[in-house]
Image (tube, grey):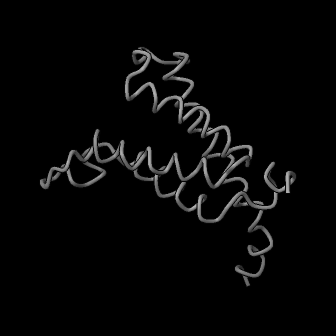
Amino acid sequence: MLSRILSRLTELSYTLLRTGAGLMFCFHGLQKIFGVLATSQPAVGTQIWFGGIIELVGGLAIALGLFTSWAAFLCSGTMAVAYVQFHWKLQLDTKFLPSENNGELALLYSLVFFFIACRGSGAFSLDRRRA
């Protein structure tokens, strides 16, 4: 019975997931690129700065549902690289676990954005309006 009730909310809940994740990701880019509520900013042209550009533009595109699959795929890969390079660091001790290497958010973003890339923009998106 619950699944019948909730199934009516599938598109709306997916839109909330896509929009919320995109806006939160976009905010990380705002922090890196413009220093919004941040204590430091990466130097222009560094790997972290480019990551911030991807977070800002990709997150906004995902939130708006514009070129969603492409943006989400790029953001997913960016977060996979961030997880491996900055959190896991290919260590096979306890640092292998996301809860121990502080990489939970990066890994979760990577998985959510991969799902969004596979699922597409959904009914409530600019991609839908363009089509």
Is 91 placed left or right of 131 in the picture?
Answer: left
Residue placed most toward the observer, 126 or 18: 126
Is 98 placed left or right of 52 in the picture?
Answer: left
Residue placed most toward the observer, 79 or 71: 71
Q: Position of residue 49 (x, y in %)?
A: 44, 24
Residue placed most toward the observer, 28 or 13: 28
Can you name the residue that lies furthest to the left here? 93
Quadrant housing the C terminus: bottom right
Q: Where is residue 27 in the image (x, y as percent from the top left)?
A: 58, 31
Q: Which residue is drawn at 13% across and 55% down?
A: 92
Q: Position of residue 95 (x, y in %)?
A: 19, 49
Is 46 situated above or below 131?
above
Is 41 situated above or below 22?
above
Residue 63 appears in which quarter of the rendering?
Answer: top right
Q: Which residue is drawn at 42% across and 20% down?
A: 45
Is 87 placed left or right of 50 in the picture?
Answer: left
